[in-house]
Image (cartoon, coloured by chain):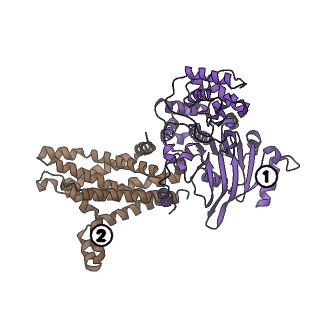
């Protein structure tokens, strides 16, 4: 087993060792359920797809994902185990990657547990399951993106609350960039930035997946997004490990 | 950025990748006896590098002095030192230690034992280093400095530690002992100077250096919710062990630190002394040639202290051990050499006996006071 996987395994087990995992998963499922069926008017729409479900995912993730990443590095620094971890024969990249993979696997587990939605829509109608599958891929990717932001913010500080707030704020910046209010405002006042901001917008890319379009462009976007924030994470861990 | 420069500047440095085979306890270089000759591997009679080394040494008895695997080579070449012969022959499977009188007989015995031992698959042939093993320092600290803003924590430290030495680091709190140890372990980046573990620079060649190092950090941090055995299994997995070897090593570490009774308890439920022993067990898992222990007996009761000191003494001949301690009697009991640090500088570097001789009363406490008060 590579050191990365060993670290990831330990971190994943640590999630389930505390109530964090249960609370997160239960709240996530309840919230998604309420939002999809009530606010999303799932039944009134009369369409056999999971669009209401996917519409709320980015916003639920925006609030919940920083909560699971805030302890990734801040906890290690608080306990002093960062000294233990980084004096093992692992590179910092392997440590960062291991923790990120654990958090991502945890999100994947939470997403898998939304299978009742898929079953429900299949019983009630005749949905395009390929589109649903592509939508879940999009959910996984946007989870990865937000997790990478959260992990980087966690490496920035010893205080978990600050890590949480900063992560939410940064995720919001990326999520709001696609909002028409923001883009209209920018087009009117700062047109140079408008085009750039539009390309940064994460929700539009995610919506491509929910529509069933798996574009190479979007895959590269998410891959480079995650890679950038993991690199930032590594730099921050290196700079601040001994503080 | 320090990290980016190191990461992308060293792309052509593939040395650490070569040493990256996991499962190798320590590379057969610098004449180290492979895999703690005196321990369980030898008892089971199934060493890998030793068996290969024995066979090779038998073939090249004449040029054995040049072999990097000096442990078994020393058995074939009496000139390398009788002390090494004592360490090597138990590994060859012979129960009785025999003095290496000539090249022929130990070599043939080594061949015989090599034949009876399970055929080793790994090519643990000696490295290309031709320097005699006993000369090369295992730890080499060279003008090491650390500054935090305007405050100098460690000021131009230089010393070397050879195999068989137990170095005691003494000094008042805040003198820079832990900072030095952290720099040696690669956790802190020095402001100036370098630290090498068996030739590997801890900053440039960090993974290879840390593979050879067992480090007990200050405060013995552990993951509180894990059980003792689970924690040790995690550390072993990260170090590249798996399967039955992992289980064996964890068992051995639990035995050495007498933690068998609490192996299933979560670490957070243990007392301070037990927690420290868990940290020590983690440092011993891979049987490293270099041990750096920050206050290994802090919080232990007198019996536990005695056991840990005994353990250090037993391990000392094969390793280079650095311990930092406030317990002066420990220095006299365990250490072969003592360095006193005050204000980030070395104020004394001698054997405990010489240190004690500095003060007319003959008490280390008085010497310590004298040295550290004048440096303050």
Up-down: is B211 above or below B4? above
Up-down: is A74 above or below B103? below
For mark 2, name the chain: A
Q: Looking at the picture, how far across and down is residue A235, in whole percent?
A: 47, 59
The foreground one among B150 and A165 is B150
Q: Is residue A11 visible?
A: yes
For disc 1, the marked residue is: B368
For mark 1, name the chain: B
Q: Quadrant of residue B332?
A: top right
What color was chain B assigned in the picture? purple
The foreground one among B225 and B92 is B92
For disc 2, the marked residue is: A197
The outermost residue toward the right is B360
Q: Looking at the picture, how far across and down is residue A61, in whole percent?
A: 31, 56
What color was chain A assigned in the picture? brown
Q: Looking at the picture, how far across and down is residue A225, in whole percent?
A: 34, 59
Label 2: which secondary element? helix
Mark number for residue A146?
A: none
Q: Is residue A155 left or right of residue B39?
A: left
The 10 Å Cα crowd at callout 1, few under 14, some 14 to 19, many 20 or more, is many
Quadrant of the image containing the C terminus of chain B = bottom right
Q: Is residue A158 visible?
A: no
The 10 Å Cα crowd at callout 2, few under 14, some 14 to 19, many 20 or more, is some
Up-down: is B60 above or below A225? above
Q: Is residue B14 left or right of residue B109?
A: left
Q: Looking at the picture, how far across and down is residue A82, in whole percent?
A: 52, 51
The residue positioned 60% from the left and 20% from the top of the image is B112
């Amino acid at each position: 087993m590579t050191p990365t996987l060993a670290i990831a395994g330990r971190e994943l087990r640590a999630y389930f060792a505390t109530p964090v995992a249960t609370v997160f998963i239960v709240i996530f499922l309840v919230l998604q359920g309420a939002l999809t069926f009530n606010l999303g008017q799932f039944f009134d729409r009369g369409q056999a797809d999971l669009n209401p479900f996917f519409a709320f995912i980015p916003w639920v993730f925006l609030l919940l994902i920083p909560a699971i990443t805030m302890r990734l590095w801040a906890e290690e620094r608080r306990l002093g185990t960062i000294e233990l971890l980084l004096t093992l024969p692992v590179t910092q990249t392997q440590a960062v990657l291991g923790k990120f993979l654990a958090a991502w696997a945890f999100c994947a587990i939470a997403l898998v547990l939304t299978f009742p939605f898929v079953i429900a829509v299949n019983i009630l109608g005749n949905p395009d399951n390929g589109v649903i599958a592509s939508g879940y891929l999009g959910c996984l990717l946007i989870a990865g993106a937000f997790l990478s932001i959260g992990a980087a913010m966690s490496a920035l500080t010893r205080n978990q609350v600050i890590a949480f707030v900063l992560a939410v704020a940064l995720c919001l910046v990326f999520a709001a960039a696609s909002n028409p209010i923001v883009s209209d405002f920018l087009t009117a006042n700062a047109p140079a930035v408008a085009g750039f901001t539009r390309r940064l917008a994460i929700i539009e890319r995610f919506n491509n997946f929910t529509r069933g379009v798996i574009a190479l462009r979007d895959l590269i976007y998410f891959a480079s997004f995650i890679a950038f924030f993991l690199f930032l994470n590594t730099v921050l861990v290196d700079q601040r490990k001994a503080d | 950025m320090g990290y980016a420069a190191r990461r992308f500047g060293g792309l052509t440095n593939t040395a650490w990748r070569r040493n990256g085979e996991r499962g190798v306890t320590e590379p057969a270089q610098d004449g180290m006896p492979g895999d703690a000759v005196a321990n369980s591997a030898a008892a089971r009679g199934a060493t890998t590098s030793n068996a290969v080394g024995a066979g090779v040494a038998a073939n090249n008895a004449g040029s054995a002095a040049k072999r990097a695997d000096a442990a078994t080579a020393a058995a074939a070449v009496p000139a390398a030192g009788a002390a090494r012969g004592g360490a090597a022959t138990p590994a060859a499977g012979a129960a009785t230690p025999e003095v290496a009188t000539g090249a022929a007989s130990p070599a043939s015995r080594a061949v015989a034992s090599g034949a009876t031992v399970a055929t080793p698959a790994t090519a643990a042939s000696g490295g290309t280093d031709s320097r005699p093993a006993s000369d090369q320092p295992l730890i080499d600290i060279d003008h090491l400095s650390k500054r935090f803003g305007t405050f100098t924590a460690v000021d131009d430290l230089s010393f070397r530690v050879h195999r068989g030495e137990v170095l005691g680091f003494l000094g008042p709190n805040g003198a820079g002992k832990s900072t030095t140890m952290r720099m040696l372990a690669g956790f802190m980046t020095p402001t100036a100077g370098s630290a090498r573990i068996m030739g590997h620079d801890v900053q440039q060649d960090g993974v290879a250096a840390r593979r050879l190092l067992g480090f007990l950090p200050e405060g013995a941090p552990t993951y509180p919710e894990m059980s003792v055995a689970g924690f040790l299994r995690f550390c072993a997995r990260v170090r590249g062990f798996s399967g039955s070897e992992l289980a064996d090593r964890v068992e051995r570490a639990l035995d050495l630190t007498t933690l068998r009774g609490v192996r299933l308890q979560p670490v957070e439920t243990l007392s301070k002394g037990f927690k420290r022993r868990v940290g020590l067990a983690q440092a011993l898992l891979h049987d490293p040639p270099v041990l750096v222990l920050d206050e290994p007996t802090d919080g232990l009761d007198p019996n536990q202290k005695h056991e840990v000191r005994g353990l250090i003494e037993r391990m000392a001949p094969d390793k280079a051990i650095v311990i930092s301690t406030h317990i002066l009697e420990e220095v006299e009991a365990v250490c072969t050499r003592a360095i006193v640090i005050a204000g980030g500088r070395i104020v004394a570097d001698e054997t405990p006996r010489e240190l004690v001789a500095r003060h007319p009363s003959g008490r280390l406490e008085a010497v310590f006071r004298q040295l550290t008060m004048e440096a303050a």
